[in-house]
Image: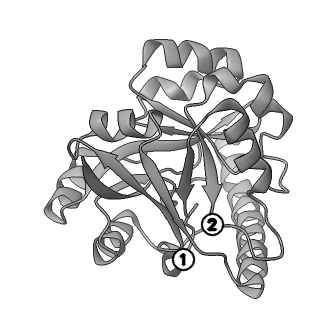
Amino acid sequence: MKKFKVQLHCHTKSDPDDWLFHNDVKLINYAAACQYDVLAITCHNKIVHTKELEKYADKKHILLIPGIEKNISNKHVLVINAHDDISKADDFNELRLYKKEHPGSLIIAAHPYHPTPYSLKNELETNIDLFDGIEWSSFYTPMFKLNNKAMEIAEKYKKPLVGTSDNHALKYLNLTYSYVFAQEKSKNAIIDAIKQGHLKIHTQPMNFVNLFLMTLRLTALEQIKKYLLKPVKRRRNKV
């Protein structure tokens, strides 16, 4: 078995929902500087992965895997090694159909018990059969232990915990990630190893002030972006 440093939850300015300042190439460059072996860009409801990005990442010695953070019944779900038809999955039954068609994808419960309306909460246990892993997110502090319930559910159902950064600002990319123990650096080998629980989380909590400011910044920028896009949508509708 070989050990690979893996980051499977990252956003960039390609994200249609978040308003961020680093592009896909800058993320790959920063991940290379942090010595990542495997990376997924997981923008909301959009696969931004391209062959050009994959080749660029390969030159940086990074395996880039297609990913997405998909709204499923208005809850966030990570799909790694995602295929284009994931866009058709809007509820849990449709996600089941997608999983049946694409058993090589990795489905992870994103920040399932964080205090956001997009967290799965009770839907995680109701649909536990769908999930190959449960996220341990970097969004927590020593006081606000927001991953504890996720850890409890992972232990209850014997699901692997997957450490990710849910990265929106490059400087926090290296707070939480996973070491995956696999036979080789390939999509199938990495995903199979995670499904079998052959991984170890590396994590350190965020500073409370940084967590607060990051949350405030993301919320404010999301609302500003929505406001700025409204006139564009209205103009398109008139045409």
Tell me if 155 is positioned left or right of 29 in this view.
right
Rendered image quadrant of residue 166: bottom right
Residue closer to the observer: 86 or 185: 185
When the figure is inspected, residue 196 is found, relative to residue 229, above or below; the finding is above
Residue at screen point 22% across, 41% down: 183
Residue at screen point 54% across, 77% down: 172
The label nearer to you, 2 versus 1, is 2
**Real-space Cα separation, disc 2 to disc 1, in angstroms:** 8 Å
The quadrant the C terminus occupies is top right
Tell me if 12 is positioned left or right of 157 in this view.
left
Q: Mark 2 points at which residue?
A: 138
- The amino acid pointed to by label 1 is Tyr
Residue 61 locus on image (x, y percent): 18, 62
Q: What element carries label 1?
A: helix
Evaluate if marks 2 and 1 touch, with contact meaning CB atoms under 8 Å apart.
yes
Residue 46 showing in the rendered view: no
Q: Which of marks 2 and 1 is nearer the N terminus?
A: 2
Residue at screen point 39% across, 69% down: 27
Rendered image quadrant of residue 88: top right
Tell me if 19 is positioned left or right of 84 in this view.
right
Tell me if 57 is positioned left or right of 203 in this view.
left
Residue 221 locus on image (x, y percent): 71, 71
When the figure is inspected, residue 8 is found, relative to residue 100, above or below; the finding is below
Residue 205 locus on image (x, y percent): 66, 75
Residue 112 locus on image (x, y percent): 74, 46
Residue furthest to the left = 59
Q: Mark 1 points at which residue?
A: 172
- The amino acid pointed to by label 2 is Ser
* Label 1 Cα crowd, 10 Å radius (few <14 / some 14-19 / many 20+): some
Residue closer to the observer: 211 or 5: 5
